Amino acid sequence: MSSVTMAILLLLSTVSFTVEKHFCGDVLIDVAVFSSTEKCGPDAFESEHQEEIKKSCCKDILDIVEGQNELTVKTIDDLEFEQQQFLFAYVLSFNGLFEVLPKQNIPHKHYTPPNLIADIHVRDQVYLI
């Protein structure tokens, strides 16, 4: 599960995308992430906004969200001495939790009990209280 989470995190950190915004005057008309924005036309607003559209020009704004281009790979030698000690102690302390136990010998595994002809407790009228 943790490897899948790390893979998704790595993928999301390296993806780049653009957010395209289309303004007519000071009014935001459309925002698009994976497609192109709709351009404003004469029927885009009510009649009171049409005069503002004619006076001011429409503009497009592109916001670029860039992911990482280079990934750094660190080795154990890049860690400080205290971090190396902590990592070593952590691995040693939890190493015993995941050991495979030796196969246990069960001496009576293939034992078959004798056939019961009569219930001895009932025959001798010995009852445990």
Image (tube, rainbow, N blue to C red):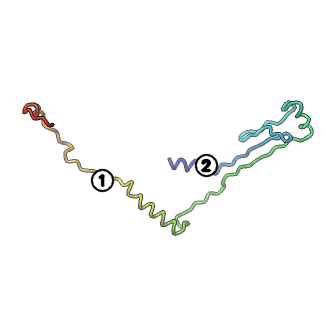
State the CA–CA distance, disc 1 to disc 2: 41 Å
Mark 2: few, some, or many residues within 10 Å (few <14, many ≥20)? few
Which label sits on residue 11? Answer: 2
Residue occupying the point 22% across, 47% down:
106
Residue occupying the point 11% across, 34% down:
121
Residue occupying the point 15% across, 38% down:
113
Left or right, 47 with respect to 121, comes to: right
Residue 77 spot, x, y in % from top left: 53, 67
Residue occupying the point 56% across, 49% down:
7
Check disc 1 and give the amino acid type. Answer: Pro
Q: Which residue is mark 1?
A: 102
Left or right, 65 with respect to 121, comes to: right
Closer to the camera in the image, 6 or 25 = 25
In the displayed image of the protein, which residue is found farthest to the bottom?
A: 81
Question: Which picture quadrant has residue 23?
Answer: top right
Left or right, 67 with respect to 74, comes to: right
Which label sits on residue 1? Answer: none
Q: Classify the position of the C terminus by image quarter.
A: top left
Residue 13 spot, x, y in % from top left: 63, 51
Residue 62 spot, x, y in % from top left: 78, 46
Mark 1: few, some, or many residues within 10 Å (few <14, many ≥20)? few
Check disc 2 and give the amino acid type. Answer: Leu
Closer to the camera in the image, 123 or 19 = 123
Residue 45 spot, x, y in % from top left: 85, 32
Find numbered disc 2 in the image and state the secondary structure of the residue it sits on: helix
Q: Is residue 40 above or below residue 81?
A: above
Closer to the camera in the image, 128 or 54 = 128
Find numbered disc 1 in the image and state the secondary structure of the residue it sits on: loop
